Amino acid sequence: MPGLGQRLKDLLRRSFDVSGRDAHLQSMQLLRENLSPAQHDQLELLNYFEVIGGDSGKRYRIHLRRQMNVEVLNKREDRARTLCFMPRGYLPTGDMMLAQKLALGLYETEAVQIANLFDHPPHGFRR
């Protein structure tokens, strides 16, 4: 049985075997199949889902978009930072989001270390 690393590589490679539209639809289906019921509901209603970091227990929000789509939430559930990280190469959006979900859940420290970080001002702060 292949290990997690090999399964992730296979997941990321499969998008090159189908057309663009089919790849997008398949990637979104695979993402939905790998979400909890609560995450699935969030994605359907809010176009994002939340993930708990596997190392720190921090909460992250992964938005349905291609760039700068991962937010670190503070204790008040406000966005504290935006993270920008993704697998190399072009992947359909669902595959990219699933890779981000798995990375934050399984390899949070490493994912955050390679991410570009963007801080946000405190809630209510005006420039």
Image (spheres, grey):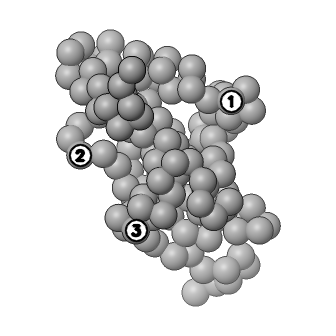
Cβ–Cβ below 8 Å for labels 1 and 3? Answer: no
Residue highlighted by disc 2: 88
Secondary element at tag 2: loop
- The amino acid type, in three-letter code, at marker 3 is Gln
Q: Residues within 10 Å of mark 3 (few under 14, many from 20)?
A: few
Please tell me which residue is depicted at 71% across the width and 76% down the height of the picture: 123
Can residue 97 be seen?
Answer: no
In the picture provided, is 49 more to the left or to the right than 119? right
- The amino acid type, in three-letter code, at marker 1 is Ser
Q: Residues within 10 Å of mark 1 (few under 14, many from 20)?
A: few
Can residue 104 be seen?
Answer: yes
Secondary element at tag 3: helix
Cβ–Cβ below 8 Å for labels 1 and 2? Answer: no
The front one of 99 and 121 is 99
Residue 47 spot, x, y in % from top left: 60, 37
Q: Which residue is farthest front?
A: 1
Asked if 78 appears above or below 39 in the picture, the reply is below
Asked if 69 appears above or below 74 in the picture, the reply is above
Cβ–Cβ below 8 Å for labels 3 and 2? Answer: no
The front one of 106 and 122 is 106
Residue highlighted by disc 1: 36
Secondary element at tag 1: loop
Residue 32 spot, x, y in % from top left: 57, 23
Q: Which is nearer the N-term, disc 1 or disc 3?
A: 1
In the picture provided, is 68 more to the left or to the right than 56? left
Cα distance in 3D space between marks 1 and 2: 26 Å
Q: Residues within 10 Å of mark 2 (few under 14, many from 20)?
A: few
Please tell me which residue is depicted at 65% across the width and 46% down the height of the picture: 50
